Amino acid sequence: MLKLKSKIALIIILLTGTIYSQNLAIGLSGGINYSIPKITEFEAQKEICPLIKLTSDFYLSKNFYLQLGAGYVQHSYSIDIFPDINLTFNYIDVSLAAKYKYKNFFVIAGSMIDIYINGATHINNYSINFDKTFSESLLYGLFGGIGFELSLGRNFNLLLQSDYTVGLKDATKSDDIEVKFNGINFLAGLNYNF
């Protein structure tokens, strides 16, 4: 699995380096993922989880950009019949999106791939790591969002963004239960325009 993660990181670095610098904006943002699991047979509790994202916006034409993103996202849930048991899943998130900017505002839509890092079951103050046979190693989904960029001068922009994500693949390998992760993301960060 580490080989796949290394290959994805290398692809991101190579793609970023091949675009002319005047057509590139690099961003770093962090925030929360309001994880909304969709689970068969049970009512799931929504959880607030951390989210970090590094993005590269490539200029295509007037107002249109292609965004490549990579980061860390966590999903978590508990079910109504066992509220003291919480399951947490950690992923490397890779995304590709189209972005349309109008003045300081933008809309964005695209696809994402989540690569499983690790997970754990938390019961009160105890944690038990998942066996890799429990979780799918690769998830995919779609997302769309809106945002705002405010110029701070000297090529820096303040970024505020909100996305809605839809998981399309079951996160577990269980035959008894299906878990798909949706989420509402709230991000704040900085962009640097070359």
Image (cartoon, rainbow, N blue to C red):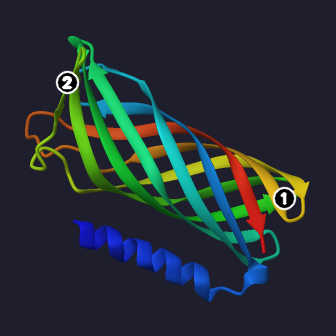
Mark 2 neighbour density, 10 Å: few (under 14) some (14–19) many (20 or more): few
Q: Secondary structure beneath disc 1?
A: strand
Q: Residue 162 falls in which quadrant of the image?
A: top right
Which residue was labeled with disc 2? 41
- What separation in Å lies between label 2 and label 1 (alpha carbons)? 43 Å
Which image quarter: residue 31? Answer: top right
**Does residue 24 appear left or right of residue 91 in this picture?**
right
Closer to viewer: mark 2 or mark 1: 1
Give left or right: position of 79 versus 9. Answer: left
Which amino acid type corresponds to the residue marked 1 in the rendered image?
A: Tyr
Q: Position of residue 145 (x, y in %)?
A: 63, 47
To which residue does mark 1 refer? Answer: 102
Please determine whether, in this image, residue 188 is positioned above or below residue 19.
above
Kind of residue indicated by mark 2: Glu
113 vs 178, nearest the viewer: 113
The spot of residue 115 in percent (x, y) is 32, 57
Q: Using the rendered image of the protein, determine whether residue 170 is visible from the camera's viewpoint.
A: no
Residue at horizontal 70%, vertical 70%? 65
Quadrant showing the N terminus: bottom left
Residue 53 x, y percent position in the rendering:
55, 53
Question: Residue 161 location, x and y as percent?
Answer: 68, 45
